[in-house]
Amino acid sequence: MLLKIFIFLFAVCPTAWCQRGCSRDRMRQCEETLLRSIQRRINDMGRSDMAAHCMNVRDDFNCLLRETRCLTSETDRNRNGDTLRNALKYIRDGCDSAGASWRDSSCYVGDPMKNCESSYPLGGVQYASHNPETCRKYNLFYDCVMDTLRNRCRPDDERLLGQYLVDSAQDLAWNCGEQTSTSDWDRNNRDDRRYDSDRRHGDAAGDRYSDRERDGYNRGSGSNGYGRDRYDRYGASGRDTYNPSGGYGRNGSSDITCCRNERCDRYRQQQCRDSLSRTIDNRMAGYQDSQKCRKTRDDFNCLMWQTSNCLNREERDRDNDIFRRARDFISRNCDTYGRWTENNCYKTTEMQRCEALVSNTRGGANYESCRGFLSFRDCMSDELMRRCTREDDLYQGAYLVDKAQEMSWQCGTTDQYNGRNQYSTFDRKYDQYDRPQDNYDNNNSPLHLEDEDAMCLSRAQSYTDQCKTNMEEKRRELYTENDFERRQRINCCSIREYRNCLFDATRRYCQTERSRVVDSLMAGYRHQLTSDSCVRVYDSECSAGLQSAASFVLLVTCLALLSALVSFRR
């Protein structure tokens, strides 16, 4: 009898939640099996096959979740987190049939489990960073859940545990490692390699999960070898100790680098710009996967922060084009993995109060609007720090651009309180008919173009005149077009093309983009670009329209030539 009990425990314990040992071999097996399982279509299976399949999926999900908590590298935890999110969606869509969800189990909806939820509420924790304090709170909740599960629930309820934990605590369920209830000593000092068969047998070369070596390499000194310059606000000592990951202790480096611990650094600014340019200029990029989109968003956020906080006006003008193209690229290729409009962090009452500070976007990047925008951005940053996770930080760049357009990178903190308008020489107010009002007080009167800008405008006069002529020709279609959406697209695309043409003119005749010249020429058209109707029109729609029109003209020309040849032969 005792022998049978021993055999039973030996067979069951390796797959039970109670097991505390960590094994990367088992983690890899669970991950591979889970990835294969979620590729199967639920609709192609019978009822009995589907039930067995869902049981296997849940078991592998629980296994991967449990093993991920053993990892010390935040990069690996984030990678596994993507797999867990996809698997959870698969479970919700295909396996949570009537009576099969944890919400239908008396174990998880009973008073004992409710007591755990009320004793260690996670309502605010799940939107916070997984720092030691929030992880301590989560682990207390986790211990309470495990005690309840062991003492008051059936063995079958264990299969629903992983989904319950993720639904209750989101990313904390895998980002908070084991034994962090009181301290992170075990995670920081545990050598997971002792659980690997490859390491056990001396095959160190085949082990790609050497967390401690990699973490030590990633942390490094943070020095880029470029010395101190005016962009290095923290001096040499700051450069040596700067950790762009914003991680805690020795828990690994996050793949999200911006923008909680960001500082001005010319080398980092150039790195982010080059990386972002390579991505959006790659003609073969196509549909991006989750990891590439995360990198693209992070580079976008980094470049925006470095540009608006560290560069002067002329330098900020140079990146106008890359910001516009990058935002359009992200919208077309990466929004399928999530967008800020679907993120709870950006829909809170507090964030809406922040948005009220930037209500005026019609005049572009002028002194008053930039002052309001910078207040809005500071308010948003505070909310991100207080209530949101580093995952939520990925969407801040797109959020800022959608709310404030070009102000998100053209409003610089160095120009904020210098007593004059650094942003636009065409800082006019408009009446209800969008006509410029020139009869307002002298304190807000527009500044004259400076000598260099005036010379630039004079040199580019013929080119800019042609830009306006082209815009007016395109806008003539508005008089004959009856479709409302088509009219909106024609209007927005023609103004956007006019603006781009003006920037091309300043680049050609003035050796650099000059927003002050462009602002003065845009006049009353500028505010239309920030209207709701134009925000919803992406650059790709404008280019698609031009390509289709050109294709139509080419087709008509070919048909005419073909018809002429046939007539000539006759």
Image: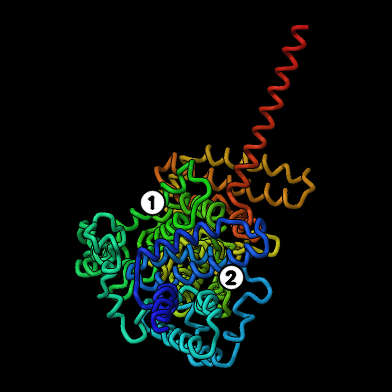
Query: In screen coordinates, is 137 left or right of 105?
Result: left
- Closer-to-camera residue (408/15): 15
Residue denoted by label 1: 275
**What residue is rendered at 50% in x and 83% in y?**
124
Residue 527 in view here: yes
Question: Which sits earlier in the primary sequence, circle 2 or circle 1?
Answer: 1
Is 435 above or below relative to 104?
above
- Estimate the spatial distance between the alpha carbons at disc 2 and disc 1, rounded to whole Å: 33 Å
Identified by mark 1, the residue type is: Ser
Residue 222 in view here: no
Q: Quadrant of the N terminus?
A: bottom left
Identified by mark 2, the residue type is: Ser
On the image, the x and y values in percent for residue 52 come to 59, 66
Image quarter for residue 382? Answer: bottom left
Query: In screen coordinates, is 286 left or right of 568?
Result: left
Query: In screen coordinates, is 256 left or right of 116?
Result: left
Image quarter for residue 421? Answer: bottom left
- Closer-to-camera residue (320/53): 53
- Closer-to-camera residue (258/352): 258
Is 5 above or below relative to 471?
below
Q: Residue furthest front?
A: 1
Name the element at disc 1: helix
Residue denoted by label 2: 359
On the image, the x and y values in percent for residue 345 come to 53, 74
Name the element at disc 2: loop
**What residue is rendered at 63% in x and 60% in y?**
42
